[in-house]
Amino acid sequence: MENFSLLALEFAETAGRGEVVEEKNLTPTLKRLCFVAPASFGEGQGYRRGVYHTLITKGDPLTDDRVLEDIKKGIASSLSKLGAAGKRRVLVVGLGNPNAVVDALGVETVKRLFVGKRGRRYVAALVPSVFGLTGLETASVVKGVAAEFLPDLILSVDTLATSRAERLFRAVQISDGGVVPGGGVGNRRVPLCKESLGVPVLSLGVSMLARFADPAFPAGLVVTPKEIDLLVPRFAGALAGGVEKALFG
């Protein structure tokens, strides 16, 4: 679990990096924080330059369907602002290990998408799994599929970590900076980004575990909610719904 990257917002808060450009209450229980990360942002830490939107809810996504509906709308709004609206061919990549519940958010999200051609748009889904299971670089797998599918946009979905207990399963990150597999522990794989894939990349993730510094554990203390097996499918549905709404209205 040490491979999960922290929310970029929290790196920015800790390091004093990034320029906040917007803080907006979308609903009484959901707000959106936006900041722009410069070229040197998170260098060596697995973060990339770009625009980051972080949706934070005060509600309980486990028990309140209205919270998930608000999150879905917030995701759709942010994806549209970051360039998803109007894209005709979209490849959605579900990152993570399908054999680990906490890491299966991306996999479960793409399962809930309606793939194929719909009107003028075509959505395809890909689950490349992880290097430890396949021996293949995720970026290489995605690039190979993209070369055949020729998408206008690649959208990755993954699990993230938080260092603040109050944000555990209550923060959603959307970014146009792409994603660096393994970047959370300095084991940086080839980034999924426009420079490496030749296609604009948006990334989407949820803080499904908390990671705290602890002198007793070299990698820190990692905590997941005891209801993780319920939270992952609920968020997967909300994320898939947000993607659908951004692409098809």
Image (spheres, rainbow, N blue to C red):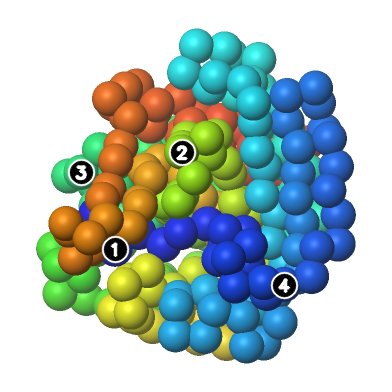
The quarter in which the C terminus is drawn is top right
Q: Earlier in the sequence, mark 2 or mark 4?
A: 4
Which quarter of the picture shows residue 57? top right
Q: Residue at x 62, y 21 (%)?
A: 59
Q: Amino acid at mark 1?
A: Asn
Q: CA distance from mark 2 to mark 4?
A: 22 Å
Per the image, the residue denoted by label 2 is: 165
Q: Earlier in the sequence, mark 3 or mark 2?
A: 3
Per the image, the residue denoted by label 4 is: 18
Per the image, the residue denoted by label 1 is: 3
Between circles 4 and 3, the one closer to the viewer is: 4
Horizontal side of residue 176 vs 193, given as left or right: right
Q: Using the image, tell me which numbered label, if any, was put on residue 100.
A: 3
Residue 246 placement (x, y as % from top left): 72, 43
The quarter in which the N terminus is drawn is bottom left
Q: Using the image, tell me which numbered label, if any, was put on residue 217.
A: none
Q: Eyeballing the image, is 199 above or below 118?
A: below
Between circles 3 and 1, the one closer to the viewer is: 1
In the rendered image, is residue 162 in sight? Answer: yes
Between circles 3 and 2, the one closer to the viewer is: 2
Residues at marks 2 and 4 touching, judged by CB atoms closer than 8 Å: no
